[in-house]
């Protein structure tokens, strides 16, 4: 009889072990529990080869042993059901997991006497099994919680504590809290550059009493690293809720299970924090959106996600708050600086540019330091050494945003090019697009170049701002954008571009103060440098006395000037590979530009932009450039230069020019008729020129013209009749041309016209009847008053769409007096 019982028990153990091994190979569900059960059974099976140990088990009453054999048969059935459990049924999964744990505990309990007797002899694997005994109590508690709302059983997704000192977030906190609670959007994004305090702000929000009252214990905080997957994020949530026996095979399985779990908690509000989400992880946010009442997702990211409408862009600290933060980091006892002069503290605060990370790190580095250390630190940074060179943590934080651009090599190159422009100044997007078209062989129409600009913006490395309302919405206006860049990000671009020796750098950014040239320039005056992008910035004391420079490979040259008078350097005559030239005055008044004769030697230059400079009659060399494709004058003073430069010129001036831009040139009264000989011109943009009264009658000679922009030329009286000859013209903008009272009848001959912008044309009382022949016209953008003039033509123009925009009379007035 004893033999029969022993055989039955051994058979039951081995059948159960076989089932466990089979299920472990067949499914990954309950993997951890099956693995533990297998260990228990292997250890128990070995007892059947040790008669002494086995006899101690068989000494139990026969009835007890047979009941246990029956229990093992039932346990086998539970094991075989593992692969059949619906994984999305959380309640069923809980129940089945508990059955497996109970089975393992029954095995341990049945052999408990033997285990305790041989405790000193027990193998390492068996010691691990004893720990499972305590797991049953935990599972019992979990099972008891199934019918009640889930509560966190670990700190995995708990909200982190707050920093010791938080400065300057009161207003941000109220605005984010209002947006989170009042907006209908389920997802809200707090966006800003690295180190600006996004995480601190969200932590502060989570500890806010009102937020805690609304969401209670259901605030789940997860940091999403660049390597995080959707499955790992969901796994953290499950483990936080005590369901650490789950293991997901697919993203779909993970989201289904999480949605099921959250629906069981639907009676409660839930807030999911996803901290530091990178652009490539945007899909995680989207996949975690469920139609569950009271469920919100708050994201922090150094990137922008246009898909989600509710976005709060975190600004940097004010100067007052910056000073407070730095002082408490530098003087932790009370934040009062007794031994360091106030003006010295203020200067270092300004160098940190309102970035909380920089203020904290710099303050900590100066904590306990002597006054001499403060002074030498200031001098070092004032002499041009970047804070980034002194503080690796700041460099690492900001550089991580750039490292993510490695896979988008051209985008990273575009970011580094931003170091070509002065700090604290707006950069015209158009010059960036011009640079990138020529440097990286991108499309001339600007689509891919604009995508690069947007990509950099979405990563919060720059800010894009339109010059005017509706800028960038329609063809021809993507260039009406300005770029703003945080100074530390600019420093980062310069730092990353300056790792090689000067002579070998692809980008060379030079700043000249008070006619003091860099030492390397003086030492290598006869040695060529291989730079491709050269930027030279001079202050208002620079007298244009240039040292020679050998830079034959330069393709882009940007000259940033502040002095009242400025002579172009003679050495540009040897830059025969130059493709793009940008000359910008950043002083209060336009800089008077001299020595323009050097430009005639730039035989390969494709694009030239002058901004905020005063030009003399010597601009004639510009019009002798046979390969020039684009020429832009922005906020320039012409005097008589433009009218006189083409007098007596060859009819073949600028034979390859395709785009001419004249914007905010307030002394421009007319255009020379010779410009109408530009046979290849495709785009003509003359905007915000308030003194311009007439256009050349020969305008119709521009046979290849496709785009004509005359926006806000408030004194312009009329459009030449010859416009009817422009058969390729598809886009016209005469918006805010307040003095135009009539359009020529010939405008109806524009068979290719598709878009017409004409809001703010207050002088127009009627439209010529020939408008009915504009069969290709698709969009008219106008104000409500002008829209009534089109009522008589809508029946003839089947493709026409009238787009009425809001009329702002005050804005129109401001355009006149600018």
Image (cartoon, grey):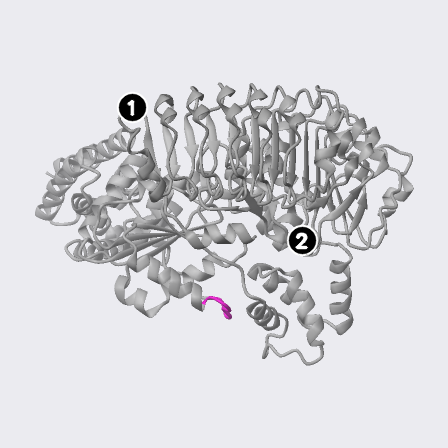
Q: Secondary structure at mark 2?
A: helix
Q: Position of residue 97 (x, y in %)?
A: 21, 45
Q: Within 10 Å of the Cα at label 2, are there few (<14), some (14-19), or many (20+) other Cα atoms?
A: many
Q: Nearer the viewer, residue 120 or 35?
A: 35
Q: Is residue 47 visible?
A: no
Q: Position of residue 534 (x, y in %)?
A: 74, 38
Q: Is residue 745 visible?
A: yes
Q: Is residue 342 above or below residue 712?
A: below
Indicate the quadrant where residue 715 lies: top right
Q: Which residue is mark 2?
A: 388
Q: Which quadrant of the rendered structure holds the N terminus?
A: top left
Q: Position of residue 78 (x, y in %)?
A: 16, 39
Q: Secondary structure at mark 1?
A: loop
- In the rendered structure, the answer to whether residue 44 lies left or right of residue 625 reads left
Dominant secondary-structure state across the stretch colored magenta: loop
Q: Which residue is mark 1?
A: 796
The question of residue 167 being in magenta is answered with: yes
Question: What is the magenta range?
Answer: 163-169
Q: Nearer the viewer, residue 705 or 610?
A: 705
User: Which residue is at 68% across, 46% downward?
Assistant: 612
Q: Is residue 354 above or below residue 550?
A: below
């Amino acid at each position: 009889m004893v033999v029969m019982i022993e055989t039955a028990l051994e058979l039951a153990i081995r059948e159960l072990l076989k089932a466990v091994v089979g299920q472990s190979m067949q499914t990954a569900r309950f993997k951890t529990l099956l693995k533990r059960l297998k260990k228990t059974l292997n250890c128990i099976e070995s007892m059947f080869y040790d008669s002494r140990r086995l006899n101690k088990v068989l000494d139990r009453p026969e009835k007890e042993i047979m009941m246990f054999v029956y229990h093992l048969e039932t346990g086998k059935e539970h094991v075989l059901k593992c692969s059949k459990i619906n994984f999305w049924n959380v309640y069923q999964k809980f129940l089945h997991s508990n059955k497996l744990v109970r089975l393992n505990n029954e095995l341990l309990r049945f052999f408990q006497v033997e285990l305790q007797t041989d405790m000193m002899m027990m193998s390492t694997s068996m010691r691990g099994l004893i720990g499972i005994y305590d797991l049953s109590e935990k599972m019992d508690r979990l099972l008891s919680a199934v019918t009640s709302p889930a509560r966190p059983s670990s700190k995995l997704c708990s909200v982190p504590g707050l920093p010791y000192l938080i400065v300057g977030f009161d207003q941000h906190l109220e605005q984010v809290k209002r947006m989170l609670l009042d907006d209908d959007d389920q997802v809200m994004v707090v966006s800003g550059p690295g180190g600006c305090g996004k995480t601190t702000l969200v932590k502060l929000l989570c500890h806010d009493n009102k937020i805690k009252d609304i969401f209670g214990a259901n605030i789940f905080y997860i940091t999403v690293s660049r390597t995080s997957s959707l499955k790992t994020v969901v796994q953290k949530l499950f483990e936080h809720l005590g369901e650490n026996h789950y293991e997901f095979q697919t993203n779909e399985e993970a989201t289904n299970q999480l949605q099921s779990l959250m629906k069981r908690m639907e009676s409660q509000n839930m807030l999911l924090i996803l901290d530091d989400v990178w652009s490539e992880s945007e899909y995680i946010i989207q996949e975690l959106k469920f139609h569950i009442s009271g469920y919100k997702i708050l994201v922090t990211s150094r990137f922008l996600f246009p898909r989600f409408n509710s976005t709060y862009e975190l600004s940097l600290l004010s100067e007052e708050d910056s000073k407070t933060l730095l002082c408490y980091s530098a003087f932790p006892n009370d934040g009062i600086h007794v031994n360091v002069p106030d003006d010295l503290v203020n200067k270092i605060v300004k160098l940190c540019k309102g970035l909380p990370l920089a203020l904290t790190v710099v303050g900590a580095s100066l904590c306990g330091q002597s006054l001499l250390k403060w002074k030498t630190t200031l001098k070092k940074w004032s002499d041009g050494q970047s804070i980034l060179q002194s503080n690796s943590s700041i460099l690492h934080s900001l550089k991580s945003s750039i490292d993510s651009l490695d896979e988008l090599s051209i985008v990273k190159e575009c970011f580094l090019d931003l170091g070509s422009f002065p700090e604290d100044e707006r950069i015209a997007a158009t010059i960036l697009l011009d640079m990138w078209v020529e440097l990286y062989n991108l499309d001339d129409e600007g689509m891919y170049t604009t995508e690069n600009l947007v990509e950099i913006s979405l990563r919060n490395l720059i800010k894009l701002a339109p010059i005017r309302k509706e800028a960038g919405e329609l063809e021809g206006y993507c260039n009406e954008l300005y770029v703003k860049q945080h100074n530390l990000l600019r420093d980062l671009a310069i730092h990353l571009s300056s790792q090689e020796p000067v002579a070998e750098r692809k980008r060379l950014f030079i700043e000249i103060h008070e006619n003091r040239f860099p030492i390397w320039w003086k030492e290598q005056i006869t040695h060529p440098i291989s730079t491709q992008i050269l930027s030279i910035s001079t202050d208002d004391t620079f007298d244009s006395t240039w040292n020679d420079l050998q830079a034959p490979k330069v393709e882009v040259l940007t000259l940033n000037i502040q002095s009242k008078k400025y002579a172009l350097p003679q050495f540009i005559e040897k830059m025969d590979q130059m493709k793009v030239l940008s000359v910008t005055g950043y002083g209060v008044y336009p800089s008077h530009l001299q020595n323009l004769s050097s430009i005639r030697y730039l035989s390969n230059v494709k694009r030239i932009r002058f901004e905020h400079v005063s030009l003399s009659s010597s601009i004639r060399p510009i019009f002798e450039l046979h390969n020039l494709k684009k020429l832009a004058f922005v906020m320039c003073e012409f005097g008589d230069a433009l009218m006189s430069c083409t007098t007596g010129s060859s009819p073949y001036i600028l034979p390859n020019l395709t785009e001419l831009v004249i914007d905010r040139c307030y002394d421009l009264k007319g255009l020379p008729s010779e410009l109408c000989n530009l046979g290849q011109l495709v785009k003509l943009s003359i905007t915000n020129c308030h003194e311009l009264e007439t256009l050349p009658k020969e305008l119709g000679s521009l046979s290849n013209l496709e785009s004509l922009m005359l926006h806000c030329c408030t004194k312009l009286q009329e459009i030449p009749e010859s416009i009817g000859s422009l058969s390729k013209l598809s886009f016209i903008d005469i918006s805010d041309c307040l003095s135009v009272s009539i359009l020529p009848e010939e405008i109806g001959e524009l068979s290719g016209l598709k878009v017409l912008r004409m809001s703010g044309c207050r002088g127009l009382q009627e439209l010529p009847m020939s408008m009915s022949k504009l069969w290709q016209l698709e969009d008219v953008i106008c104000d409500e008053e002008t829209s009534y003039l089109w009522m008589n033509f809508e029946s003839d123009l089947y493709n026409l769409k009238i787009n009425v925009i809001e009329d702002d009379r005050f804005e129109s007035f401001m355009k006149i007096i600018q």
